[in-house]
Image: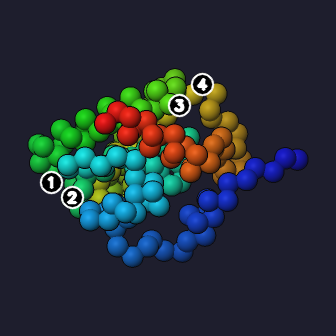
Amino acid sequence: MEQLWAPWRMDYVGKDAAPDGCIFCIQGIPHQDRQRLVLFRGHHGFIIMNRYPYSNGHLMVVPHRHTSEIEDLSSAERLEIFDLLVRARQVLNRCLKPQGYNIGINLGKVGGAGVTEHVHLHIVPRWLGDTNFMPVFADVRVIPEHLEATYETLRQAFEEMG
């Protein structure tokens, strides 16, 4: 039997409780962008990699302002969030060439939100045949590239886009 290694997952599955503070409230700390996997910062929001991805290149678009409700976002914030979604897809299309996407917002614990207190949008690249028996039988996802390698590739593409 082959071994599948995903050592960064232990940071997630080994935690008993959520970290103190909101993981998405990152205003004023751009020096931590690499450590936090932030790829791009806009005026009202930012694009960040999901540290515990469903697939390679799983990104999130997050407003800077802390709110759990999409209704609380201003028109300018909503517009930029959607513009950031488009920008993220452009970079993913260029770098990873997915064949499709799952894009969505999970609101509230019952709605599937892992972080309920700060609204965010998921962008999950998909490829033909990327689902298999592993999540069903072993509760394991196979991610073909290390997060740091994907981060470097995507970060460079965001910088080149301007």
Marks 1/2 in contact by CB < 8 Å: the verdict is yes
Q: Residues within 10 Å of mark 4 (few under 14, many from 20)?
A: few
Q: Residues within 10 Å of mark 2 (few under 14, many from 20)?
A: some
Q: Give the quadrant of the C terminus.
A: top left
Mark 2: secondary structure? loop
Distance, label 4 to label 2, CA atoms, is 36 Å
Please report the residue visible at 56 percent of the width from the left and 51 percent of the height from the top.
Answer: 148
Q: Which tag is nearer the camera, tag 4 or tag 2? A: 2
Q: Which tag is nearer the camera, tag 3 or tag 2? A: 3
Which residue, given by chain and number where applicable, does mark 3 sit on?
A: 96
Mark 4: secondary structure? loop
For the residue marked with disc 3, what is the amino acid? Leu
Distance, label 1 to label 2, CA atoms, is 10 Å
Q: Looking at this view, is 147 or 74 the one in front?
A: 147
- Choose the circle earlier in sequence order: 4 or 3: 3
- Choose the circle earlier in sequence order: 1 or 2: 2
Which residue, given by chain and number where applicable, does mark 1 sit on?
A: 72
Marks 4/3 in contact by CB < 8 Å: the verdict is no
Please report the residue visible at 43 percent of the width from the left and 73 percent of the height from the top.
Answer: 19
For the residue marked with disc 2, what is the amino acid? Arg
Which residue, given by chain and number where applicable, does mark 4 sit on?
A: 128
- Choose the circle earlier in sequence order: 3 or 2: 2
Q: Residue 8 lies in what quarter of the image?
A: bottom right
For the residue marked with disc 4, what is the amino acid? Leu
Distance, label 4 to label 3, CA atoms, is 13 Å
